[in-house]
Image: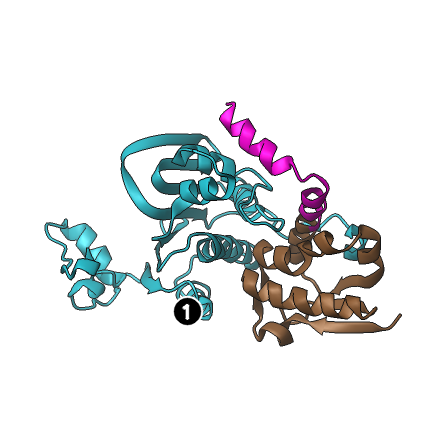
Amino acid sequence: MKTRQINIVNIIGDNYAVEAEEGQKVYNQIVAAIDKNFKVNLSFLNIDMVTTAFLNSAVGQLYGNYSEEKIRKHFMVSNMSESGKISLKRVVETAKLHYKDADALKRSIEDILNE
Amino acid sequence: MKKNLNNVNFQHISPRTENILERNEFLSYFGKSKRQDYKHTTIKYLKLEPEDGKFFKNYIIQELLAREELPTMSQPLKNKMIEAIYEIFVNAQMHSNCEFIYTCGQFFPKKNKIEFTIVDNGIGFKEKVNRRFDTQFSALQAIKWAVIDRNTTKKIPGGIGLALLHEFVQKNRGKIQIISAEGYYEYSEANIIYKEFKGEFPGTIVNLQFKTDDSSDYLLKSEVNDINDIF
């Protein structure tokens, strides 16, 4: 399988990867490459700030589109800062749960109502 | 008020408050001259549209990161603080359907703290949650729900930003205040306060307080050897 490197800084034109809309642009590129059977290497080189809003859009959404197995096979990240890794780990855990348990949000609403 | 072509003026402000509001340039938006910030402790008042993300970045660099007067802080702590501010800023951008976002702040060198405020004139927590889930939540219920990890009004995964902010503020011994519609919420290491007040704020105010004399280790490893193992 061929690898395609996606440089975030080149897509968003900035060293701050913070806005959800920018994450969406990155997500679209990732999906286009995976659908052409590439392995995506998402590079955070020269990115100095990331938010979970950006990561949810760029990476979290992948779990709604592909199986975990397919993501492991077709997707990797590189050049992430330690704090970026902490955020990404949280984003991936949340995304897996979000798509596995569709009723979780409904239950969270009921929990507040029943307090 | 402005939409009805009214002029907005401020009168009977205490001299001390007026001095601060002149130095952070807030009153310059309402017909007063700018005053030099001779104490170098204000983070200027800024009014911007939700699309002005790049402008906000320059503001953060100029008014916070590049300031010589910024109290001594470790680089990882500075990064965590900026990350926290951004999580709130992008929430206002994404969720509030607002026309404007307003920010300002203040250094307190003797008290070793920084306060930073982000305000939007959008629909607020209550309306946002009620529209999404067709509920009748009060503002307090909506805030209570929104600060729980993984709760989001988006269709895609989310709800992590506020949870991460709480974890950072707890470690940093700082404070978060949220005011939205009739709801008031305050979080600090010491306690959590929920209160309802009589008036209603037409939007959301988030006040963040960070301690600058925090020696916690913010360079903790992500607990995974290879980040790609998480997928």
Residue that protrudes farthest toward the left in the picture = B12
Q: Nearer the viewer, residue B91 or A89?
A: B91
Residue at disc 1, secondary structure? helix
Which amino acid type corresponds to the residue marked 1 in the rendered image? Gln
Q: Position of residue B112 (x, y in %)?
A: 41, 49
Residue depicted at 46% across the width and 64% down the height: B65
- Which residue is at 44% across, 54% downward? B92
Residue furthest to the right: A1
From the top left corner, tell me how far across and down residue B25 is, in percent.
Answer: 25, 63
Q: Position of residue B6 (x, y in %)?
A: 14, 59
Residue at the spot of label 1: B62
User: Is residue B33 part of the magenta span, yes or no?
Assistant: no
Q: Position of residue B205 (x, y in %)?
A: 36, 47
Q: Which residues are magenta?
A: A92-115
Q: Colour of chain B?
A: cyan
Q: Rate crowding at label 1 as few (under 14), some (14 to 19) or many (20 or more) other CA atoms within 10 Å.
A: few
Q: Main secondary structure of the magenta part?
A: helix
